[in-house]
Amino acid sequence: MRILDRINGYKKIGKPFFSFEYFPPKTESGLHNLYSRLDRMAGLEPCFIDITWGAGGSTAETSLTLSKDAQTYFGLNVMMHLTCIGMSEEKLRSALDQARDSGIRDIMALRGDSPRGDRGTEPSFIESSIDLIRWIKKNYGNTFGIAVGGYPEGHPEAKSKDDCVSFLKKKVDAGADFVVTQLFFDLEEYRLFLARCAKVGITCPIIPGILPIISFDRFQKFTEFTGIKVPPAIHAALDPIRTDDEKVRNYGVELCSTMCKELLSLGAPGLHFYTLNLESSVTETLQKMDLLDDCRTRRSMPWRASKVDGRKDEDVRPIFWSNRPKSYLARTMTWDDFPNGRWGSSFSPTFGSLNDYYIFRRGHDPAVRENRLKLWGSPKSEKEVADAFANFCLGKINFLPWCEMPVQIETSRIVSDLVTLNQNGYLTINSQPQVNAAPSDSPDVGWGGPGGFIYQKAYVEFFTSKENLLALLERVKETPSISIHAISAAGDSHSTLDDQAVSAVTWGVFPGREIIQPTVVDSKSFKIWKDEAFDLWLDEWRALYAKDSESWNLISRIHGDYFLVNVVENDFVNGDIYKLFPCFKGR
Ligand SMILES: Cc1cc2nc3c(=O)[nH]c(=O)nc-3n(C[C@H](O)[C@H](O)[C@H](O)COP(=O)(O)OP(=O)(O)OC[C@H]3O[C@@H](n4cnc5c(N)ncnc54)[C@H](O)[C@@H]3O)c2cc1C
């Protein structure tokens, strides 16, 4: 769906939207960190995100990769910026062809500036934003929606503010769908800009661009660079605290949320944040404004749907990849048909290899390696490994090889049980609580929109020793409502289910619709997942240590000896999955 349609959708329901701008980082570890951030911020459900374009195409490759990955793996609607100064026709075509082929449907068309103050490193095929819009329209028809930049205080090259807005009108007339403004701090300037736009007949959405003040130095750099006005009150507030980063940041959030409220009251359809690739100030601002409350319930599925063409009708996934959704998407990227309602139609899916997934495996980058060592340490015993898993459940660390995202809010219902399991040698990597008819707009387990009811079978997946597994298998014999499937790296398998079994573990009942069962447990995909899950011990964790060191040997041993186990409590009304485990004796 084009961004303009999404904007109109928000307008229809009377809700303001928000969007985030990111720029391509220069280093591999910067890119890695940005991917984690994008993943988390995707959970805030922005209307769209946009990725900037380096002057003369200097960031072409990273801007394109980032845009494509954000769209494909993070379920975000991406708008890619494109500047024309210093770009040949071939470069422009290549950028737009690649964007189109990656499913990107919106471009911010900009003239741009030369990086060295001249006309760029090579002659420009197109020199004006208006010509760029016309050229895209002529060559790509309606493939792309188009946004343009607007300048509330006037562009430095404009003869006057009125001239600048007349030029903006020409950009809109050439085919722009909406305008995103340059950052500003003076609300009066913005109000006057809106009045000038209205006077010349610009009627498309105008989205104010907002920069949260994160540090005094950056604030100064940006305001100097753009030459935008800073009202005296902001100077007065910042001057006494300029050397105290924490106070500057807090003031920035306060100012940003006050500005945003006023912008919405001036009729802004949404808020566009210049994130500078940072997360907390924007998130805090949105929280302060109560704009995040119901984002979970706007989801159509419990998982975040990919926005690439061809996956729109996907309505069921195996639970195993729920903490590694990007891997699942990468492995199933070549599927042209997704299981529809019942997983059975894709019983023999050719899960792809992880070739396409290299971007998320960056364990060998020194900065990434260092960070992982900080998170997981250099364990000398199985207990120390278990501690890392327990710390993940407690939110003390935010990443494990099997869990790319911090624990989900719904996990808070079962977090103490999971910690107990980990402390007793069941290293949990996935779980969901039992839910019996929770409202579909419930903030922790809700999905699919209001008016329905959500059901979940309790599920827990973990690695454990053979000894622990054998004890569990004995107890399962006395608990018919439990299904269990365990498998070792070598393929030694124990299961209470037959090979063809598929069990829905999440389903929703909605007025006027068939029952939706978006998450399943099935034996076949568990076997495929098992290879990936065991490989992660070696590729992501063991790879941190020198060969034959104590930690290296420990992780090798766990990989060789442990079983990957999934357990489902089918009694979603009265069952208690944790009773199965000896450590919950007497419960
Ligand atoms: C939302 C936003 C995102 C941006 N993203 C990027 C990015 O990703 N990468 C990047 O390098 N830069 C980016 N920029 C900066 C932008 O490239 C610069 O501001 C550049 O100088 C102008 O580009 P433009 O397309 O807005 O220019 P235009 O709108 O084409 O021109 C800017 C102004 O110059 C005057 N002008 C230009 N041509 C004429 C003419 N023929 N006759 C009369 N007046 C004229 C007009 O006043 C006009 O408003 C962004 C700016 C904004 C506002």
Image (cartoon, rainbow, N blue to C red):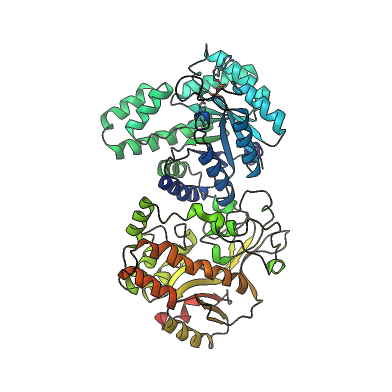
In screen coordinates, is 525 left or right of 341?
left
Q: Is residue 159 above or below residue 112?
A: above
The quadrant the N terminus occupies is: top right
Give the quarter of the image for residue 352: bottom right
Q: Is residue 234 above or below residue 482?
A: above
Q: Nearer the viewer, residue 201 or 305?
A: 305
Q: Is residue 346 rendered to the left or right of residue 303? A: right
- Residue located farthest toward the top when viewing the structure as drawn: 159
Query: What residue is at 65 percent from the left and 36 percent from the top?
Result: 4
Q: Nearer the viewer, residue 120 or 53?
A: 120
Q: Residue at x 59, y 49 (%)?
A: 72
Q: Nearer the viewer, residue 556 or 430?
A: 556
Q: Quadrant of ligand 1?
A: top right
Q: Residue at x 40, y 69 (%)?
A: 416
Q: How many marks?
A: 0
Counting from the top left corner in percent of width and height, residue 73 is at 56, 52
Q: Position of residue 238 (x, y in %)?
A: 31, 29
Name the spot of residue 39 as percent of width and height, x first: 50, 50
Q: Is residue 528 visible?
A: yes
